[in-house]
Amino acid sequence: MCIDVNHVSKQYTLWKIKGWTRRERQVIEAVKDVSFRVEPGRALALIGPNGAGKSTLIKLLCGILSPTRGSIRVLGMDPFKDRSKLAYHISSVFGQRSQLWYHLPPIDTFLLLGRIYDIDRVELKKRMKELVELFDLSSFLYQPVRKLSLGQRMRCEIAAALIHNPKILFLDEPTIGLDVVARSMVIDILKDLNQRKNVTIILTSHDTGDIERLCEDVIVLNEGRIVLESNIREMRKNFFHTKIIEIEFAGQHADLDLPPGVSVIERSGPVVKLEVNLKVQDANEVVSRIVAQNSVRDITIQDPPLESIIQHIYLSGDPAGREAEQNAQIDG
Ligand SMILES: Nc1ncnc2c1ncn2[C@@H]1O[C@H](COP(=O)(O)OP(=O)(O)OP(=O)(O)O)[C@@H](O)[C@H]1O
């Protein structure tokens, strides 16, 4: 087992100043009785709305914070107590914070990290060469970090985090602020690391595209609690109550005669998008009916975007995937 989290809670204590002499204690329970396990080589997404406790959980797993209750084992170690020993085997990237020296070029941070992790000179040179190639850093390796674009800096951040060949990589919003091209490059590299080098990845992101491309497992947190723990494929299956049918009509078409449970969500010239409620209608039957009544050039059936399922889970606050269980019972 790579990560084993048992009934972990984390409280922050804040002191509010009340008048000149009084202070009021306020306790925020950011993580509440959370338990889960991660097998080596998996890619897990921690998702949830703002303030759900994702960053706190990552900090607990990295040993930056200690739990108020419960126990955590990462690679068999207690991350808080064995922090310096564990540091040789894990790494973290926080999108909002940098570990690169701002006024120095990235190469200097790489060399410094090589010293910190006691990496032999020859080995360090070899690893730097690999990372420079993998992240395509050669054109700005000797430029001060302050002069790099955000995308270039993030590539250097992740490269720096990998210099000591960690077994687990924790990433908290690693693509925040990146444009589509830079984001796609970062996610592709992470996927490659996960699949080829078996690096376990724990990621928080608000971007469903990143999650879908990189992760196979997902934990949804809400107000500090796990509200769903699932495989992304299972989550899609259990939470999809709708299908989207996109039809391109050949020429003019009369008003569609739609059965109950089917509604038009978009119209653009000859293209019409329909949403089918699968609890009421079968999508294939809807397609057959439309094709029989109209002249159709193209027709596709799609799943709704992952984003809409996640939104649905957040809104329903469905504890421990109760709705998913009910659906599984109905289906099966
Ligand atoms: N250092 C701290 N001191 C006090 N409260 C904190 C601290 N860090 C986080 N919190 C509180 O703990 C709760 C969880 O915060 P956390 O940053 O873990 O959530 P998050 O899911 O990562 O949110 P976001 O998506 O906005 O980054 C929030 O209510 C937050 O205000």
Image: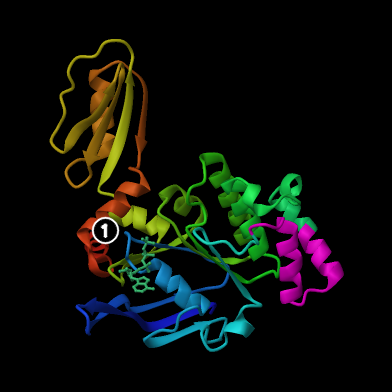
**Vertical placement of 260 versus 150: above or below?**
above
Task: State the residue at coordinates (63%, 84%).
Answer: 85
Task: State the residue at coordinates (79%, 57%).
Answer: 129
Lateral position of residue 33 relative to residue 117, left or right:
left
| Count of numbered badges drawn on the protein | 1
Lateral position of residue 97 relative to residue 245, left or right:
right
Q: Does the magenta segment cover residue 124?
A: yes
Lateral position of residue 322 relative to residue 200, left or right:
left
Q: Is residue 331 visible?
A: no
Q: Amino acid at mark 1?
A: Tyr
* Quarter of the image with the C terminus in it: bottom left
Dividing the picture into quadrants, the one containing residue 156 is: bottom right
- Between 253 and 55, the residue placed more toward the observer is 55
The picture quadrant for ligand 1 comes to: bottom left
Q: Which residue position is annotated with label 1?
A: 314
Dividing the picture into quadrants, the one containing residue 232 is: bottom left
- Between 216 and 258, the residue placed more toward the observer is 216
Residue 71 percent coordinates (x, y): 43, 87
**Vertical placement of 145 versus 55: above or below?**
above
User: Which portion, as a residue range, is magenta?
Assistant: 102-128
Lateral position of residue 169 relative to residue 321, left or right:
right
Question: Can you name the residue that lies furthest to the top here?
Answer: 251
- Between 263 and 284, the residue placed more toward the observer is 263
Q: Does the magenta segment cover residue 169?
A: no
Residue 225 percent coordinates (x, y): 30, 72
- Between 230 and 147, the residue placed more toward the observer is 147
